[in-house]
Amino acid sequence: MTVPTSPERQALDVPVAQHNAVLAEEVAPIPEGMRPARGPIAILPRPAEVFTAAVRAAHGEVAELSPATRGLIWLSYAQADQLGSTLAANPQIQWVQLPWAGVDAFSRILAEQARPDLLWTSAKGAYAQPVAEHALALSLALLRVLPTRATASSWSTVPEGRSLYGRTVVIIGAGGIALELIRLLEPFGTRVTVVRRSSRPVPGAALTVPTSALAEVLPQADLVIVAAALTKNTRHLIGAAELALMRPVANLVNIARGPLVDTDALVAALAAGTIAGAALDVTDPEPLPDGHPLWSEPRCLITPHSADTPEMTAPLLAERIRLNVRAFLTDGRFVGVVDPFAGY
């Protein structure tokens, strides 16, 4: 039997599973006096129909950038400088929706444009499910020694591979990805420790510790998953000292931002066998250049920043836009509000 393609599935009314946002914080309305002024919304640099439709579904007005513009949906992660010049030339804009969960590419713009009457929102939490799914896939691949198996050209008699069941997992970060990972890990009976800015407990985690206690929990980990925001304070959060604290049987997974891990330190740790392996969906630098030592490291698995694809993210971002346009026009219940000073 031929498996139907996506259009055929739709024609046959076969339901296709949809991702949902996973929010780490309860949505609270922006106080009345601090809400952005209502008005037309511009979508830049290039509008796409799926996002234009999302604005209109919330009864928003999509219009060209003009002195009347009050909301801006920015769709480019790469063109941060252009966003800065757009905002500088249009101080009447009071709400900006950014396209991704991480806002590190816009950190300079956030600082330069920080003003009381400008509200920033991101997609944080929107892509948590596909990214957490990818993190789980990478984790299982490392434990089952799939990087070695995938490149083998002969039958191995070495009994390698470990089970995820009952393992100790350290998740760095407490956002939507971490929450979804905890849910996905539950059937494996893992013991999850979450490392976050505060020690406020995370639902489902056996232990929650502040970042200052990272060194205390790394030596017990079988698996360390990096899912934190990249800020000036988290760059190289995992460096030579942290890698040295991990056990030789422990694995590292990074699905957040490349600079959270010191690449040179990771190359050295893998070469020395300090840790069992690493799986990276993000690298520093990115893209990882041809010939980089990580490409030839047999214990390293690299995916090209593909934890979420445009096919996965487009409907999720469209829903975030719809919700925030509704908040912009009605009750002020914006989702994914960004603190421009904290950087996420």
Image (cartoon, rainbow, N blue to C red):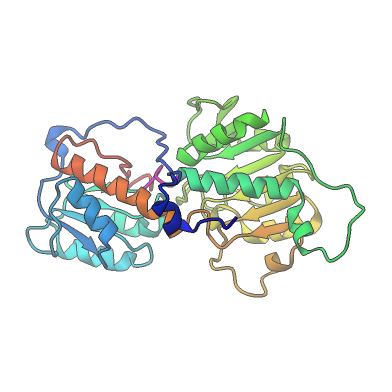
- At 58% from the left and 38% from the top, the residue drawn is 171
Residue 144 position (above or below residue 309): above
Furthest residue toward bottom: 290
Q: Which region shows up in magenta?
A: 123-127
Residue 138 position (above or below residue 173): below
- At 55% from the left and 66% from the top, the residue drawn is 285
Task: Based on the picture, tell me whether residue 126 belongs to the magenta stretch.
Answer: yes
Is residue 55 shown left or right of residue 8? left
Is residue 219 shown left or right of residue 323? right
**Quadrant in which residue 116 is drawn:** top left
Q: Nearer the viewer, residue 218 or 317?
A: 317
Task: Based on the picture, tell me whether residue 316 belongs to the magenta stretch.
Answer: no
**Quadrant in which residue 294 is drawn:** bottom right
Q: Nearer the viewer, residue 4 or 294?
A: 4
Q: Residue 136 at what x, y percent from top left?
A: 61, 44
Q: Residue 245 at what x, y percent from top left?
A: 72, 42
Check the picture and name the quadrant holding the N terminus: bottom right
Q: Magenta: predominant secondary structure element?
A: loop
- At 48% from the left and 31% from the top, the residue drawn is 198
Q: Residue 161 at what x, y percent from top left?
A: 80, 45
Q: Nearer the viewer, residue 336 or 310?
A: 310
Furthest residue toward front: 1
- At 16% from the left and 50% from the top, the residue drawn is 94
Q: Does residue 84 show up?
A: yes
Is residue 277 shown left or right of residue 208? right
Q: Residue 311 at what x, y percent from top left?
A: 43, 57
Q: Does residue 112 show up?
A: no
Furthest residue toward right: 157
Q: Nearer the viewer, residue 142 or 269?
A: 142
